[in-house]
Amino acid sequence: MQRQFEDLLLGSIELFCLAAEAESFTVAATAASVMPAAVSRAVARLEKRLGIRLFVRTTRQIRLTDEGRRYFEQCRLALNQLAEAEREATGQQTTPAGVLRISMPTPYAHYRILPLLGEFRERYPGVTIDVHLSNRNIDFADEGFDLAIRGRAPQDSSLIARNLEDAELVVVASPSYLRKARQPGTPDDLDSHDCIQYELPSTGRSLPWLFKRDGELVEVVTRGAYRSSGDVLAGVTLARHGAGIFQTYRFVVEKDLEQGTLKELLIPYGGCSRPFVLLYPHSRHLSSRVRSFLDFLIEKLRPSQVGD
């Protein structure tokens, strides 16, 4: 293997990352116990090597350029992996530590994962958790994520997908809506109702509703005056305030159903579900913090029929 990085260059990358995180050469210098001029020279060496500007500098602050931010995400990931490799080599990997970056959709985050993170941190106080809430597909390489949770497994052979759970779907409406509209008896009756639409961020198309009819799964295309995208919880809020009927995950509306703010509809046609899967790259070495988080989720979600 040909050598590509000299000691000075690796040190420059570390100083650059410190400056990027702190948005200050002075703060980075203090953290590294060097003079601010040393940080400035390190960044200048990298800019000359790469042929790009990493920071926009003013008299009062610095901020990363778009190219600098992409480079920073890659460098941060690489330095974390080097630190993890050193911990494993010296037998220190038994105590997970470092930053765990995970992307997940809004409803699953709020109702499934975020309530568990406090307990995870009690077990592994050395792990810092960076949570990104989004339904869009992320780029592991460019954005530096360790894990992602999505509502379906992508057609990407470079990713490993592990099933977290099959989340049950329910159709709901508020008592106020049902007072002014006749309750549907079958999925066909939805044609005469205002059905709140959720558009998939990846396609821009409304998600069809799922039902079981005579033991078979059927998709029903609904129509309505309200559309939301990016956040399923918007549809729940609309339904809660009488805007129409909505199909969503049972775990999102359990309290509403108990309290009577929403009523479950079309129960004989229920029992359908959509999966949530955990994704990570095939090629990536799993650090102890990532493995610990995987094991933790499996343990905590076991009552929800977790499987691989």
Image (cartoon, rainbow, N blue to C red):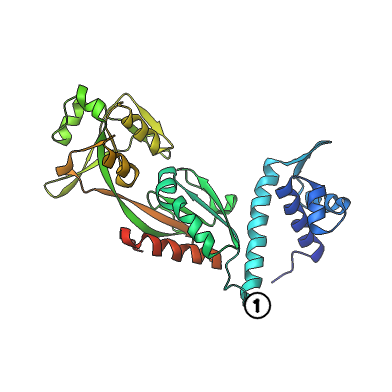
- Judged left or right of residue 37, residue 160 is left
Residue drawn at (30%, 44%) of the image: 254
**Residue 221: percent from left, percent from top:** 25, 34
Task: Say whether residue 128 is visible.
Answer: yes
Q: Which residue is mark 1?
A: 90
Residue drawn at (27%, 40%) of the image: 257
Q: Report the quarter where the C terminus lies.
A: bottom left
Q: Quadrant of residue 284?
A: bottom right
**Residue 35: percent from left, percent from top:** 88, 54
Q: In front: 289, or 58? A: 289
Residues packed near mark 1 inside 10 Å, few (<14), some (14 to 19) or many (20 plus)? few
Vertical arrangement, residue 234 with respect to residue 290, above or below: above
- Judged left or right of residue 260, residue 232 is right
Furthest residue in direction front, as rendered:
259
- Judged left or right of residue 289, residue 191 is left
Q: In front: 245, or 147? A: 245
**Residue 144: percent from left, percent from top:** 59, 53
Residue drawn at (67%, 41%) of the image: 66
Furthest residue in direction top, as rendered:
180
